[in-house]
Image (spheres, grey):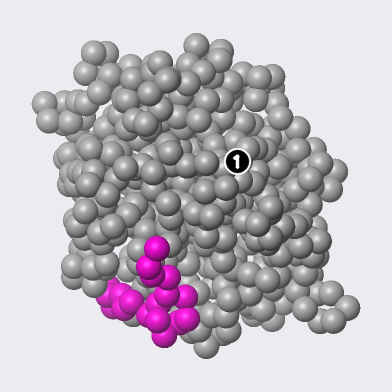
Amino acid sequence: MVCIMKNNFINYVILIWLFFSCSITGNASLRDQDALFFIDVSEPSGITSIYERSRFDTYPYGSGIVVLDYDNDGHDDVFYADRTGLDLLYRNQADGTFMDVAVDASITGGSQVGNGGGCAADYDNDGDQDLYVSSYGYSRLYDNHGNGTFKDVSLIAGIQESGNIYSTGCAWADYDEDGFLDLVVARHLHGWDVTKMKKNEFIEAVEPLVLYRNNQDKTFEDVTYLLRDKRETHDDDGRELGGIFGAGFQPIWVDFENDGDLDLYVVNDFGELIAPNVIWENRGLDPMGEWHFENVSLGSGGDVAMYGMGVAVGDYDGDGFFDLYITNIGDSVLLKNLGDGIKFNDVTQNAEVGFGMIEDENRVTWGTIFFDYDNDGDEDLYVVSGYLDHLKEAKNPIKQNNLLFSNNSDGTFKNVSAESGLDNSAIGRGTVFFDFNDDGCLDIFVANIGDMPNLYENKCTWGNHWLQVELIGMNINRDAVGSRIELTSRDRTQVRHISAGGSYMGQNMRTAHFGLGDSQIIDRLVIIWSDGTIDQLDDLQVDTKIVVKQDKSN
């Protein structure tokens, strides 16, 4: 028996006209506010911290954003990695406003020396979400006490990273299927003046990514060797490269083949100078009883050599296989999963999401998400832009507008940035989606350098139906990371996966969101838990959120 708890949400209405006098920003001030899909409510919501550059920011990568419900009140909160002071933890007060509670919660690290990001998950299965914060100089694991406070347990847990190491994106997943979440952390260059580096100097400045296995006792073991290329590729200086070597920005765990285990994809910066993006196929236990990964990058179509930043995962074409969108300096890349092993095809231009089509080839993009902003049943694409001021040869201004591409449901997208209200011109970095006001429409948070973040409320004028699904694992990790949800309505099936890490050094809400269009009927909801057990739910109501607890007896 699957335990289901239902809560119908009451639409939360914000008096938009009261906000106009204090929150109109960027391009929106020049347009009819009533016509926009989204409106910036950062200031009235209390999210006003400015991410300031410091003297250390020769090469500013900015901040990631993590959505988590740290206090288990049913409302998503936001962790925002600051640059020069304390990190920020914005508690959702369920009235359209947020309060920074970082000090009270003992989130007191602050990046101090470098840029930051993070990922959140219940790594010890005690019922509350913990938080890993990455940065340059000192990364931290915060254990959630369940009373609104955290404790830095990095040293005790065995994953303390300090010194001349720049940890970037991270992601949690139970790769070995033991019921406890493991952690992968990407790393970038620890040499900052990249404008003067030669190729060999780039390689010398790289710190390889690291994979930590959860020992089930609140400690971790470094098992990065599992990812090493057994062919032992070396550079000219005899330095082992293997697959783990690259200027990584963001790792993600995805079941690309739909075979029931999680594969690892890592987006790398400076792909042509150091190493392109990497894919490790999860092969399970080898004959010696050790978990086995195989580097299948070569020939996969996913080994793109680019200035990779962030990555979005979604099934944009509705074929049941997860596709990738990867941000870049210049044209970003849309990779269609061919559903034949781990194979991808670059469909950027055919899908009409290439920047050349909008006369903007020199754009620099960072955070990106697939999300169904209009609840019509297909996943749209949002891309955050922001310049790097050392690219003096490029034509674009330092502040660049963000982009929203609406899914046409035929494999192509339409650029609707101007009418969306999401095209703020700024030095953007991280972005995530969540439903902060519980109205069934997805909202957006964007981090900027030298400016306040943007909290964009979805005005939810579409009139389409929706369903949100939160999973609680019992025989698996409690957050059900790695599980797959399939929803069928009117003979159309959508898929979502539960993840803990992604976009650009951040994490979207854990709850799965489905737009249903005008359909008021859900034919079936199939949950494939990360241990392979399956539950099917029928006769579900639309426009609600359900919490599904795994049956211990399965």
- Give the residue pinned by disc 1: 273
Q: Amino acid at mark 1?
A: Leu
Q: Is residue 482 visible?
A: yes
Of all residues, the one furthest to the front in this rendering is: 237
| Residue 464 spot, x, y in % from top left | 50, 32
Q: Residue 396: which quarter of the image?
A: top left
- Looking at the rendering, in which quadrant would you find the C terminus? bottom right
Is residue 485 visible from the viewing direction of this image? no
The residue stretch that appears in magenta: 147-164
User: The N terminus appears in which quarter of the rendering?
Assistant: bottom right
Q: Residue at x 21, y 53 (%)?
A: 84
Q: Is residue 162 magenta?
A: yes
Q: Quadrant of residue 320?
A: top right
Give 113 or 213, whichever is nearer the viewer.
113
The x and y percentages for residue 547 are: 51, 62
Viewer-proximal residue, 448 or 98?
448
Q: Position of residue 126 (x, y in %)?
A: 46, 80
- Residue 10 part of the magenta segment: no
Dot 1, crowdedness within 10 Å: few (<14), some or many (≥20)?
Answer: some
Residue appearing at x 29%, y 45% in the figure: 57
Q: Is residue 389 left or right of residue 340?
A: left
Side of 441 where 350 appears, left or right: right
Considering only vertical position in the picture, is 333 above or below 541?
Answer: above
Q: Is residue 80 above or below residue 70?
A: above
Q: Is 130 or 203 nearer to us in this picture?
A: 203
